[in-house]
Image (cartoon, rainbow, N blue to C red):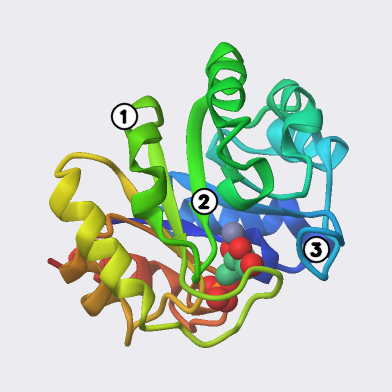
Amino acid sequence: MPQVLPSLLSADFARLADEMARCAAAGATALHIDVMDAHFVPNLTLGPPIISALRKATSLQLDVHLMMSDPMRYAEDFRKAGSDAITIHVEAVGQRRMDDAITRLRALGCQVGLAFNPDTDPRLWWKWFDRVDLVMFMTVYPGFGGQAFIPEVRDYVRATRARFPRLPIQVDGGINRETIPQIVADGADRLVCGNAFFLDRDPAGFLRWAEAVR
Ligand code: DX5
Ligand code: ZN
């Protein structure tokens, strides 16, 4: 059964507490939070102080997506700020430092995720998949909300689902009423939705619909 994670990047940043309450009222149990460092991606968002403030204002799970060139330098700060899940990009860490990064993230006691840009072949990273709680395929090039879904990533989702039947597979970017049936059929079960959730006239209805897709 798929789970929708509203992405706060599409929320009104002047009213984040209200927006989080709106997510909870719509039936969400987790929120996706995009951290961008203006280096790994060409955009800049927020850091640990804002996560701490959000943590005090909601009991929803905080799923934190680190689009950062040096995520391990800040991972502990993000955990202390109240992140429940921390997802790092494999491109930022590289294969040589991956064992160490996963060991250190596991020691923080949160859920651990690995994210993949649309042109990164996950098969080269499969040997680490049994050490993490989720993998996340970017279905757009990260950096901005409201972009168009890249259909080529569907092959990676299908291949990963075939090889790892029980691993949570999250998808992020251009996930909406049109793309959800396809990507769920491919095997994704965690759906990050920015614009599709926040711009819907009936976000609760959208969430109910999306979580019933099989
Ligand atoms: C983009 C972010 C996404 C973004 C998705 O780099 O990682 O989480 O909020 O937004 P939509 O769903 O509008 O494509
Ligand atoms: Zn994201």
The reply to whether callout 2 and callout 1 are in contact (CB within 8 Å) is no
| Disc ID at residue 7 | none
The reply to whether callout 3 and callout 1 are in contact (CB within 8 Å) is no
Q: Vertical placement of 33 versus 178: above or below? A: above
Based on the displayed image, in which of its 4 quarters is residue 57 positioned? top right
Q: Vertical placement of 108 versus 211: above or below? A: above
User: Is the C-beta of the residue carrying label 1 under 8 Å from the nearest atom of ligand 2?
Assistant: no
Helix or strand or loop: what does disc 2 sit on?
Answer: strand
Tag 3 residue: 13
| Disc ID at residue 130 | 1
Tag 3: amino acid: Phe
Instruction: Residue at 69%, 33% (x, y): give it.
Output: 55
Q: Vertical placement of 145 versus 76: above or below? A: below
What is the spatial separation of the Cα atoms under label 2 and label 1, in whole angstroms?
Answer: 14 Å
In this orientation, does residue 191 appear? yes
In the rendered image, residue 148, in percent from the top left (x then y), is placed at: 52, 88
What is the spatial separation of the Cα atoms under label 3 and label 1, in whole angstroms?
Answer: 36 Å
Compare marks 3 and 1 and give the one earlier in the sequence.
3
Tag 2: amino acid: Ala
Tag 2 residue: 115
Compare marks 2 and 1 and give the one earlier in the sequence.
2
- How many numbered marks are there? 3
Q: Is residue 191 or residue 53 the one in the foreground?
A: 191
Left or right of 90? Residue 9 is right
Left or right of 171? Residue 22 is right
Pointer 2 local density, CA inside 10 Å: few below 14, some 14–19, many at least 20? many
Pointer 1 local density, CA inside 10 Å: few below 14, some 14–19, many at least 20? few
Left or right of 191? Residue 32 is right
Looking at the rendering, the quadrant in which ligand 1 lies is bottom right
Tag 1: amino acid: Asp
Identity of the residue furthest to the front in this view: 96
